[in-house]
Image (tube, rainbow, N blue to C red):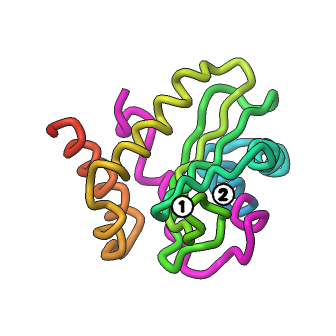
Amino acid sequence: MRLKDFLKPEYVKIINNGAKNKEDILNEIAGVLTEKHNLDDKKEVFKALMEREKKGSTGLGKGLAVPHGRSPKVKGMHVCVVYYPSGKDFEAYDKKPSSLFFSAITSDDYSPHEQLEILRIIAEIYEKTDIAEVIKNVKDSNELFNLLIKKEEETINI
């Protein structure tokens, strides 16, 4: 499984200001998922993300967060990437702001293994490359998409 198999440029968004707290962030992410994937119920997507977040923060640290959830009202898997250049408090384990949010919403019966594999790919990109630094130079969502694909290639070629 590779990023380019499920992530498209239109699923990537840069938000320069926006959310003030975790709930606002999840609401914005739910909006991106709903809009970009033509999902029917933003409230349901938000609820699924929020329910998962209540079990423990998905802020992994080093600027990365992976909010995800499951919903009976969603079919299959849908992903998006939201980047906040200024960073947002997302209760990350290292207590630092999160700037890159990689989010996935799946149906209740979707393979948990596949969802976790996608989240593993993103974590590996963050762990094995300099993305946390070079991401600061991206100017638009297309550039961010291309950077993510490039950095995944670097992890494969290590």
2 sits to left or right of 89: left
- From the image, tell me which residue sits under label 2: 29
Which quarter of the image is occupied by the C terminus? top left
Q: Are marks 2 and 1 in contact (CB under 8 Å)?
A: yes
| Mark identifier at residue 134 | none
| Residue 87 drawn above or below residue 146 | below
Residue 113, how many percent across, how many down?
54, 21
Q: What residue is shown at x 68% (from left), y 52% (from top)?
A: 57
Asked if residue 75 is among those painted magenta in the image, a careful observer would answer no
Amino acid type of the residue tagged 1 in the rendering: Val
Residue 36, how many percent across, how many down?
59, 50
Q: Name the secondary structure under disc 1.
A: strand
68 sits to left or right of 134: right
- Of the image marks 2 and 1, the number of the one nearer the N terminus: 2
Residue 45, how many percent across, how many down?
76, 45
Q: What residue is shown at x 65% (from left), y 43% (from top)?
A: 68
| Residue 50 drawn above or below residue 94 | above
Amino acid type of the residue tagged 2 in the rendering: Ile
Q: What residue is shown at x 60% (from left), y 56% (from top)?
A: 59
| Residue 85 drawn above or below residue 28 | below
Neighbourhood count class around disc 2 (C-alpha, 10 Å): few under 14, some 14–19, many 20 upward? many
| Residue 5 drawn above or below residue 68 | above
- From the image, tell me which residue sits under label 1: 82
Part of the protein shown in magenta? 1-26
Residue 111, how many percent across, how many down?
60, 19
